[in-house]
Image: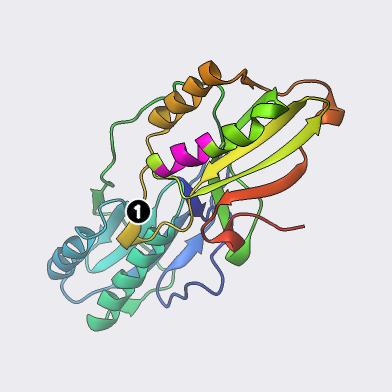
Amino acid sequence: MILGVYWYFKFPDQLYDFQFFKFYPGYGGHADNPPELTARIQVENTDDFIHKLEALKSDFKKTYLHLNIDGNQIIINIGDYMLFDFHFQFAKEVEELLIRENVVLLDASLPFTIQSSQNYPPEREEFKTIQHCFIQMVGSDFKKNNAENYAARIDCNLPLQHKKELIDDLTHICREENIDVFYYNDFDFKDHCNLMLFFTNGRQKKEAIQKVDINSFGNKVRQLTQKYALHFGHFGSFKEYPLHGPHIKLMRDEEYIITKK
């Protein structure tokens, strides 16, 4: 699983600029339409161009590429359910190829009949169901450059006397499980504490894509219930809801992840 900064609803303004590609946002709900970057072009030699594009794609194993072909016209689609930095980096390198090849940018309204298609799926790990019901996968509101963030959230409560030790143990687990960002909200009352914990990563670029085994992480968190009187969920009523924070323990690319009050 890849956690971290992504784009779904809006383009990463001021981060990337494209001459050929157009960004189409995702639509959630019943439509469930993923975002994509699309370019419609005309080339001199279709087979030669596709061969060069395939060679470029081999350096971006986590990206999805789809081609619709009509003679010497090609519609290039780069998309996935979340567009991370490495998707936009791939599009930039494709654009450099398009410029070198002197391709022609075509208007989307021109007639186009799909004669053939080629699909290059991303290299994915075996799908794993999240085994731990106490882990919620959550997105965020918009941050810098319209970014969103994909994170694991855990709600829990425990005696106040063990709060610092728990946070220290969780910080250690994050370092073991390839998680660079850990922050939390809390609410202390009497001798107890409610916690809302967030675990994620920063921007995911081609040269440093981070993979997180969410079940390995969850196993280690569950083991802490044997060390402390730790319970999942919040204790008490809404007035004890953990809204104090965020308190940052580990952070990277902060402006893309949290909004400071």
- The image position of residue 164, as x and y in percent, is 63, 36
Q: Quadrant of residue 244?
A: top right
Q: Position of residue 104 (x, y in %)?
A: 32, 79
Q: Is residue 22 visible?
A: yes
Question: Which kind of residue does numbered mark 1 sit on?
Answer: Ile
Residue 119 or residue 163, whichever sits in front:
163
Which residue of the protein is positioned furthest toward the front in this rendering?
161
SS class, disc 1: loop
Look at the picture and state if 246 lies above or below 221. below
Is there any visible trace of residue 130 in the rendered image?
no
At x 29% / y 81%, what residue is drawn? 99
Residue that carries the numbered disc 1 in the rendered image: 209
Q: Which residue is farthest right? A: 239
**Is residue 163 found inside the magenta-colored segment of the image?**
no
Mark 1 is surrounded, within 10 Å at the Cα level, by few (under 14), some (14 to 19) or many (20 or more) other residues, namely some
Residue found at x 72% / y 29%? 194
- Point out residue 193 in the picture as x, y percentages from the top left corner: 73, 29
In the image, the segment drawn in magenta is 169-175
Image quadrant containing the N terminus: top left
